Image (cartoon, rainbow, N blue to C red):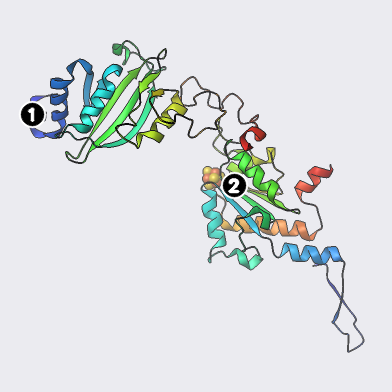
Amino acid sequence: MSEENQVEEQPTPLILQKLEANHADALLAHDETRGTVVVVVRKEQAYAVLEYLKTDPELAYAFLVDVTAVDNSQMESELMQFDYARFMVVYQLYSYQGQCRARVKVPVHENDLNIPSVTRLWQGANWLERETYDMFGIHFEGHPDLRRILMPDDFDGHPLRKDYPLRGHGERERFNFDKQNA
Amino acid sequence: MGLDFVGQGAAETDGNIITTTIDKVVNWGRKNSLWPMPFGTACCAIEMMATLASKFDLSRFGSEAIRFSPRQSDLLIVSGRISIKMMPVLKRIYDQMPDPKWVISMGACASCGGVFDTYTLIQGVDQFIPVDVYIPGCPPRPEDLIDAVLQVQQKIASGASPKGVEAVYE
Ligand code: SF4
């Protein structure tokens, strides 16, 4: 990020300045796209960083807009720098105070799909994390009620993963009436 | 209509005697007072609402008494996408409707999955419940839905069994 940018857009660099001062070891990369700061954060410190972003009186990212994930398994090179994590869990934040947005991305490896739940910080994360679990199979540790939210309870697989076939594994022909009615 | 006026000749009975059969009278009543159970799950339901509202006014055809309880209705209008999570609900609602009952599958999605050839969408509700009249279109215009109701009426007037009854006795 250039020097002028920092002068022009006061709230945007503030988050980076503060993160670099307080959580430098957690930061893997940062970027800016259309006025939104994007930070890539190590999974181990993700909860601490999000808590910091929410509770710091100057940043005050009080609103969790969305939690979702991205499956990078069919994407080339770009993310290899984070020693290839298949999934990126994405948190969209908004600060009423600074009237600005921030995006926090956390790489999650396929062989360890656990990530701390942020329901203790934002109650609204409950259903968002359930959807992310349903669609990608990310396991949010400490979530009060981690069940599927969109697909039927007995559904097998996580449909937004890139290796899930568009037409499914035949679920739409052979689902179980009785089990679901029970 | 199946109602024949007789009694021509004698002045006091002229046009005042009607001969028919019980079936025909019952069917005549049924056809002109269909009570639809709306099962609107997507955009097609908007057209269904338009059909019911004042501009298109389905009550001109005797079908304005929308019942949100399947136990009080005899025409199921499936309008919209049915997912594999919704299909058991639809099936249960169909099962709760008293016989005789007719089903209209409204729009491409309900009839064949439409553009949503995906893991979660039923590719045609007729795989699981018997459908009497299909309406093509995405979405069909209210006139199409009215036409489908008229086709159901014709079917009733002709004395044909609903698809569901045929399926049981076949
Ligand atoms: S057929 Fe078209 S209008 Fe009807 S539910 Fe499907 S997408 Fe919507």
User: Residue A62: which quarter of the image?
Assistant: top left
Name the quarter where the N terminus of chain B is drawn: bottom right
Q: Secondary structure at mark 1?
A: helix
Q: Position of residue A98 (x, y in %)?
A: 16, 38
Q: Position of residue B70 (x, y in %)?
A: 65, 53
Residue for badge 2: B107
Q: Chain of mark 1?
A: A
Under 8 Å from ligand 1: the CB of mark 2?
Answer: yes
Q: Height in image: A65 above or below A3?
A: below
State the residue in front, B42 or B1. Answer: B42
Q: Residue at x 41, y 28 (%)?
A: A132
C-alpha gap between disc 2 and disc 1: 56 Å
Q: Residue at x 56, y 60 (%)?
A: B51
Q: Secondary structure at mark 2?
A: helix
Name the quarter where the C terminus of chain B is drawn: top right
Q: Residue at x 63, y 38 (%)?
A: A181
Q: Residue furthest bottom?
A: B11
Q: Image quadrant of ligand 1?
A: top right
Task: Identify which amino acid the numbered label 1 is placed on.
Answer: Glu
Q: Height in image: B7 above or below A13?
A: below
Q: Position of residue B55 (x, y in %)?
A: 53, 65
Give the label on residue A157, or none: none
Q: Is residue A141 left or right of residue A11?
A: right
Q: Residue at x 56, y 26 (%)?
A: A168
Q: Determine if residue A42 is in view.
A: no
Task: Identify which amino acid the numbered label 2 is placed on.
Answer: Gly
Q: Height in image: A100 above or below A171?
A: below
Q: Determine if residue B9 is in view.
A: yes
Q: Position of residue B161 (x, y in %)?
A: 80, 52
User: Residue A86: which quarter of the image?
Assistant: top left
